[in-house]
Structure formats: C-alpha cells, structure tokens
Image: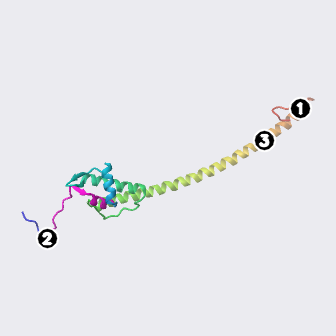
C-alpha cells in the first residue's frame, strides 16, 4: 500500500511527552515540570535517563489547567481555533463551550441586576414600614395621653383623687 503524495502523512499522537514539551504546552518552565515530577504530582517514567510523561497524564493536566484558568478568571475568553500541544480542538465544540459560558455570564449579570433591584425594593419597603411604625407609636402616645386626661376628668367627677396608674398622672 503506497501513501498518496497529495495528502500529508497522518501524524499519530505520541504515547509520551518530554518535560520540555509538557512545559511548553502548560506555559511553564521545564524546571517547574521537573519539580512536580520529583514531588510526584505529575506521573512520569524515566526512559533512557529522561523523564517521559504519558499522553493521558499530559491531556489531564492540560484540561485541569484550562478549567482552573477559566474558573479563576485568568482566562475570560476562549479562542475558537487554537492549536494546543495535544492537537487542534474541534471548533464546533469550542464554539459550543464559548456559547455556554456567554449564556452563563448573561444569566449571572441578570441575577446580579435582579439582586440589586430586590435590595432596593427591600430598602424601600423597610423605610415604609419604619414610617408606619413611627406613625403607630405617635398614635399610641396620643391615645395614652387622652386616657390620662379622661381618668383625671372621671376622678374629678366622682370626687376622688386621681390615681397614677403605670406611671401616668
């Protein structure tokens, strides 16, 4: 079977990546990757004296790094056609994810606006209730004063000394 000269050869993904390759994919130094390999936080094997990282481990690290970058806010926009160390992402999937993130951001903005509006309504209702409470306290004070006047008038009519009930004359 011969290879068609018009088509480039299909490059299979490697089974392992070197420290320098992984460092480039992660955007860190070789020393940072080597330190993590020595600590055991990156699983690697030594082949001919050089550390080799299994492709599955490299992919998991890249996915985790992208996920934490997006979650932490370091990455706020995902490119649609970006070549990664493990190959090109399918733009359809990326467009879908970007659309989902944009939708979530719109929902978040709406929820924040709703929360602010609810806060304003709460403050307005609280101010109204405080005003009503103040008016009721005034009504109670006026009624107590009237009760005191009526008791004094009754005492004068029946010829008794006015008594002070509850600290009121």
User: Position of 84 compared to 143: left or right?
Assistant: left
The location of residue 144, given as percent across then percent down, is 80, 38
- Residue neighbourhood size for the residue with mark 2, other residues' Cα within 10 Å, grouped as few (<14), some (14–19), many (≥20): few
Cβ atoms under marks 2 and 3 closer than 8 Å: no
Quadrant occupied by the N terminus: bottom left
Residue 62 vs residue 101, the one in the foreground: 62
The residue labelled by disc 2 is 6
Q: CA distance from mark 1 to mark 2?
A: 118 Å
Q: Circle 3 — which element?
A: helix
Residue 120 vs residue 65, the one in the foreground: 65
Front position among marks 1 and 2 = 2
Q: Circle 2 — which element?
A: loop
The location of residue 24, given as percent across then percent down, is 30, 62
Residue 161 belongs to the span the image colors magenta: no
- Residue at the spot x=25%, y=58% of the render? 18
Residue 67 showing in the rendered view: yes
Q: CA distance from mark 3 to mark 1?
A: 20 Å
The residue labelled by disc 3 is 141
């Amino acid at each position: 079977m011969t290879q068609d000269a018009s088509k480039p050869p299909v490059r299979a993904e490697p089974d392992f990546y070197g420290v320098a390759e992984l460092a480039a994919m992660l955007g860190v130094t070789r020393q940072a990757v080597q330190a993590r390999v020595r600590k055991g936080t990156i699983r690697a094997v030594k082949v001919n004296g050089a550390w080799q990282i299994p492709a599955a481990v490299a992919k998991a690290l890249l996915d985790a790094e992208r996920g934490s970058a997006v979650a932490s806010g370091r990455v706020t926009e995902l490119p649609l056609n970006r070549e990664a160390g493990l190959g090109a992402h399918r733009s359809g999937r990326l467009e879908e994810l970007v659309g989902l993130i944009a939708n979530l951001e719109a929902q978040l903005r709406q929820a924040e606006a709703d929360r602010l509006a609810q806060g304003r309504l709460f403050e307005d209702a609280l101010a109204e209730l405080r005003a009503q409470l103040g008016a009721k306290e005034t009504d109670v004070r006026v009624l107590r004063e009237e009760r005191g006047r009526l008791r004094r008038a009754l005492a004068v009519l029946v010829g008794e000394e006015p008594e002070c009930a509850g600290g009121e004359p």
